[in-house]
Image (cartoon, rainbow, N blue to C red):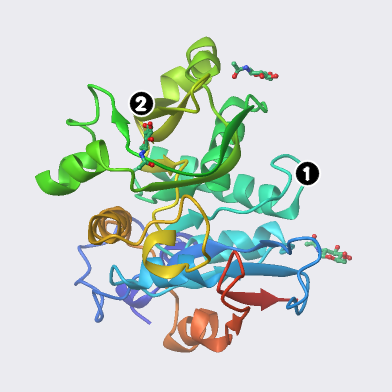
């Protein structure tokens, strides 16, 4: 086998020195952001096995032109390291698990550390956190649980952009009309009880140095961060739920399906996938690639009143 046909971790372990430039991979559009599973919600009567991925996160990434690799919890560090070298980014979804003790948080920590190391060494590996994923990133960066309770369980809000939003990597790629809708219309769905307040962010040197705040919101009492991006790493976090507008249909305050909301959702996914396109990681063979993809698992329909319309379940 020649160097260029090997996966990136295989290239490193094969002991080759830095290569001559490899031609682009055959299927350049093949992108594999991983979506991390998590422990089942308590009392989920549809559950098969012990962990799940809400299908909305899979559709969200697929809708922006990427294929998805489900990353299971409760795997070994070696397995995660191998997966890391095969995928082009990681999405940490919303949910409801312990941010310091769960298997979800353990796997998130492993990938976060791998991503830091890889990016430090000149590799490119983006991480996107949504809601719980946002909160998990804040815990991983500060090494503390600095979140506070807010009254934001089912409410759609407009983003209050900071001065840094315009020059941010994330929002500078958004069309003007989408930025305008985000700033003026109540189209970002909030379904969280915990938030990272501006106060705690400002008081924590690790968070302050690591993340740039792109938007905030308030529950009327506390101002919290709704969007942030890391200064030196391709890490992004939204406390709101862009994936719900196009893909979830529970009738509840805070759910929005307007054209503007769906359009804004697409631009967030498209931005994450455009970041994943910069990653050179690949699977070492087409067989390994096929076996890893989400298509091997059937989603389960959970009914019109379910908080997640469809879930993928894993052992
Ligand atoms: C996965 O879970 C099983 C059962 O709880 C446990 O015995 C095993 O050690 C776990 N594996 C890892 C890698 O954590
Ligand atoms: C700040 O963080 C602490 C936890 O260390 C938490 O108890 C408190 O509610 C937070 N305060 C605000 C205003 O976010
Ligand atoms: C939109 O959100 C604002 C808070 O920023 C709130 O005051 C207003 O009532 C909301 N409007 C609707 C129609 O929900």
Question: From the viewer's perspective, is residue 78 above or below residue 7?
Answer: above
| Residue positioned 39% across, 74% down in the render | 6
315 displayed left or right of 210? right
Question: From the viewer's perspective, is residue 113 above or below residue 1?
Answer: above
* Residue 128: x %, y % from top left: 43, 49
93 displayed left or right of 160? right
Label 1 environment density (alpha carbons within 10 Å; few <14, some 14–19, many ≥20): few
Q: State whether residue 102 appears in this view.
A: yes
| Residue positioned 45% across, 61% down in the render | 15
Q: State whether residue 175 appears in this view.
A: no
Q: Residue furthest top?
A: 203
Question: Which quadrant, please, contains the N terminus?
Answer: bottom left
Question: Which quadrant, please, contains the C terminus?
Answer: bottom right
Residue 221 got which mark?
none
Q: Which residue is mark 1?
A: 101
Residue 212 got which mark?
2
Name which of mark 2 and mark 1 comes first in the sequence.
1
């Amino acid at each position: 086998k020649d160097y260029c046909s090997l996966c990136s971790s295989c290239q490193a372990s094969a002991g080759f020195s830095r290569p001559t430039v490899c031609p682009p991979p055959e299927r350049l559009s093949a992108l594999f952001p991983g979506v991390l599973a998590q422990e089942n919600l308590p009392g989920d009567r549809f559950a098969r096995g012990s962990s799940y991925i809400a299908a909305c996160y899979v559709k969200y990434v697929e809708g922006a032109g990427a294929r998805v690799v489900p990353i299971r919890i409760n795997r070994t560090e070696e397995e995660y390291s191998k997966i890391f070298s095969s995928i082009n980014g990681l999405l940490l979804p919303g949910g409801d698990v312990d941010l310091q003790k769960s298997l979800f948080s353990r796997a998130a920590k492993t990938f976060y550390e791998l991503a830091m190391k890889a990016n430090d060494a000149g590799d490119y590996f983006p991480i996107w956190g949504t809601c719980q994923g946002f909160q998990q990133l804040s815990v991983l960066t500060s090494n503390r649980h600095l979140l506070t309770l807010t009254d934001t369980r089912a409410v759609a809000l407009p983003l209050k952009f900071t001065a840094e939003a315009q020059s941010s990597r994330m929002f500078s790629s958004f069309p003007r009309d989408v930025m305008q809708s985000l700033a003026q219309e109540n189209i970002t769905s909030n379904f969280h009880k915990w938030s990272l307040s501006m106060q705690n962010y400002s008081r924590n040197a690790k968070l302050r140095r690591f993340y740039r705040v792109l938007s905030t919101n308030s529950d009327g009492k506390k101002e919290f961060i709704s969007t942030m991006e890391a200064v030196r790493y391709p890490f992004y976090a939204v406390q709101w739920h862009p994936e719900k507008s196009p893909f979830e249909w529970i009738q509840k305050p805070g759910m929005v399906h307007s054209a503007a909301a769906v359009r804004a959702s697409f631009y967030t996914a498209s931005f994450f996938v455009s970041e994943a396109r910069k990653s050179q990681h690949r699977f070492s063979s087409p067989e390994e690639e096929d076996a890893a993809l989400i298509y091997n698992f059937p989603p389960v329909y959970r009914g019109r009143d379910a908080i997640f319309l469809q879930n993928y379940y894993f052992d």
